[in-house]
Amino acid sequence: MADDRRAEPPSGAKIAALADRLKERIYATITMVAVVVGLDLGDVGTVGAAGTVLTTALGLWLATFVADQQAHRTVHRRLATGHALRRMLYVSSPLLSCAVGPALMIALAALGVLSLHAALLVSAGAGVASLFLWGFLGGMRMGGGALPAVLAGLVDAAIGVAVVLVKTAAGH
């Protein structure tokens, strides 16, 4: 017999952690779009591109983790441990995972499945598409219907496109 009880809604702390985690993922996506567009405009091979993507993700994560620890230490007068440390790691992990898609595309380029140019463009396009999707889903969750959700998605995707245009105009 199926259990008809509904799952308990997430607590305020869980919701805040989810929101912070999504914020980091969106930030990392925008940053990675800028990085792959910059790589495409440069003269790098697959090894250099992979190294740049991976070190960018690691650098973003380390900078965030150090800043989170510094803030925690300053406010609480001690290093984050236990639950606070697990929350920091949970929230910041998307900064590392933002490299997965571009790294996979670059690996396909290294294997000769597609050109590095195509791999980097697919990576940038996927980043912009994910910005649209998050905006759309956020708009749907707000309950305004499909049209406002599509508009929210387009606004978020426009941010990614603006990053591409700025990087292209700057030539790096």
Image: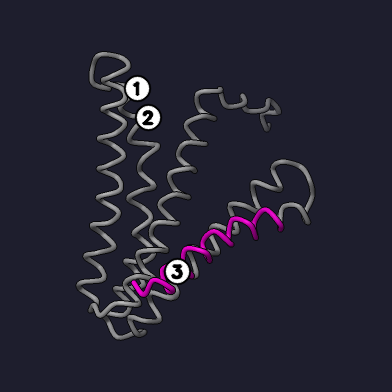
**Res. 124 mark:** 3
Q: Nearer the viewer, mark 3 or mark 1?
A: 3
Instruction: State the scheme by which the image is colored.
Output: one colour
Mark before the other along the chain sequence, 3 or 2: 2
Q: Amino acid at mark 3?
A: Ala
Q: Can see residue 160?
A: yes
Question: Few, some or many C-alpha atoms within 10 Å of disc 2 (few <14, some 14-19, many ≥20)?
Answer: some
Q: Amino acid at mark 1?
A: His
Q: Which part of the image, by quadrant, shows the N terminus? A: top right
Residue at position x 58%, y 62% from top? 158
Q: In the rendered image, which residue does mark 2 sit on?
A: 87
Question: Few, some or many C-alpha atoms within 10 Å of disc 3 (few <14, some 14-19, many ≥20)?
Answer: many
The percent coordinates of residue 88 (x first, y second) are 34, 32
> Which segment is the magenta one?
151-172
**Res. 83 mark:** 1
Instruction: Indicate the quadrant where residue 53 lies.
Output: bottom left
Residue at position x 71%, y 57% from top? 151
The percent coordinates of residue 134 (x first, y second) are 58, 52
Mark before the other along the chain sequence, 3 or 1: 1
Where 120 falls versus 71 (above or below)?
A: below
